[in-house]
Image (cartoon, helix red, strand yellow):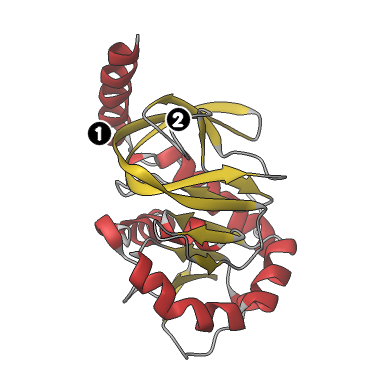
């Protein structure tokens, strides 16, 4: 049995990012992989050791401030689980909160969890539009697409980017990096939601969660022709425009 946890679904669910949880769960159930979902909000009990896939979505600056104290109280347990291989997908605001801090336009620093060596600063303009990113998954090159809409500009320290921007802005619109990757932690600015649009990435996260739980075997192929075609059309459009 795989356990999926959607952390703060009431506050961190911008741009339909709940669809990432739905895609993960559906793709498990279509393969008859037992899976359960837990939604955990402020003040509710959570043991990260019991979670196989954790989703942390995006929210506004106000919402991130509201849950900062609660999330900070969970930092030690989350850090330990990450070091133990917890599969975590963090999008936009959730991504930013894993870093050292977020500096607002007014110069106020909202402390992050400090789990990843990165920081975010509010930029002068919003970075909006469709994005194409190239990444490596088990040494296989994969191109994914999504939609970004953020004013925060993220800069990485001693942590690897999730991928290279082929079209769009990515972390900050300057260094052609998108997201961050540490062990089984995947951070990204890509909405869409990300996993329904990119089934290869969704299945990779499922595989990692199964490995950590000690479930062996390859994933049964699914009929993904429609999703793959939609992804290919968007990639072609974006790469043509940048070329």
Residue situated in front as seen by the camera: 185 or 151: 151
Q: Position of residue 66 (x, y in %)?
A: 40, 79
Q: Is residue 183 left or right of residue 141?
A: right
Residue for point 61% across, 58% down: 210
Callout 2 crowding tier (Cα within 10 Å): few <14, some 14–19, many ≥20: many
Asked which secondary structure carries label 1, the reply is: helix
Callout 1 crowding tier (Cα within 10 Å): few <14, some 14–19, many ≥20: few
> Which mark is drawn over residue 70?
none
Q: Position of residue 32 (x, y in %)?
A: 44, 60
Residue situated in front as seen by the camera: 217 or 97: 97
Residue at numbered disc 1: 226
Single out the mark in the foreground, 1 or 2.
2
Residue for point 62% across, 51% down: 118
3D distance between C-alphas at marks 1 and 2: 20 Å
Residue situated in front as seen by the camera: 211 or 152: 152
> Which mark is drawn over residue 133?
2
Position of the C terminus, as image quadrant, is top left
Residue 38 in view, yes or no: no
Asked which secondary structure carries label 2, the reply is: strand
* Location of residue 131 with respect to 153 vertically, above or below: above
Mark 1 or mark 2: whose residue is earlier in sequence: 2
Residue situated in front as seen by the camera: 76 or 68: 68
Q: Position of residue 149 (x, y in %)?
A: 30, 46
Position of the N terminus, as image quadrant, is bottom right
Q: Position of residue 24 (x, y in %)?
A: 42, 56
* Location of residue 187 with respect to 107 vertically, above or below: above
């Amino acid at each position: 049995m795989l356990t999926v946890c959607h952390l703060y679904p009431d506050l961190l669910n911008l741009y339909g990012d709940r669809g990432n949880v739905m895609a993960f769960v559906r793709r498990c159930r279509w393969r008859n992989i037992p899976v359960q979902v837990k939604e955990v909000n402020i003040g509710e009990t959570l043991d990260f050791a019991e979670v196989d896939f954790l989703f942390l979505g995006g929210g506004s600056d106000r919402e991130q401030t509201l849950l900062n104290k609660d999330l900070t109280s969970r930092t030690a347990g989350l850090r330990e689980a990450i070091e133990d291989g917890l599969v975590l997908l963090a999008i936009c605001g959730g991504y930013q909160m894993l870093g050292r801090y977020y500096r607002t336009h007014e110069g106020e620093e909202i402390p992050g969890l400090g789990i990843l060596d990165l920081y975010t600063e509010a930029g002068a303009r919003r970075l909006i539009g469709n994005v194409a990113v190239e990444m490596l998954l088990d040494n296989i090159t994969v191109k994914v697409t999504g939609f970004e809409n953020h004013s925060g500009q993220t800069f990485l320290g001693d942590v690897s980017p999730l991928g290279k921007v082929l079209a769009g802005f990515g972390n900050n619109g300057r260094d052609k990096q998108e997201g961050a990757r540490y062990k089984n932690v995947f951070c990204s600015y890509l909405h869409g939601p990300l996993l329904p649009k990119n089934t290869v990435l969704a299945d990779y996260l499922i595989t990692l969660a199964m490995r950590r739980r000690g479930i062996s075997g390859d994933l049964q192929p699914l009929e993904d022709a429609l999703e793959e075609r939609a992804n290919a059309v968007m990639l072609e459009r974006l790469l043509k425009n940048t070329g």
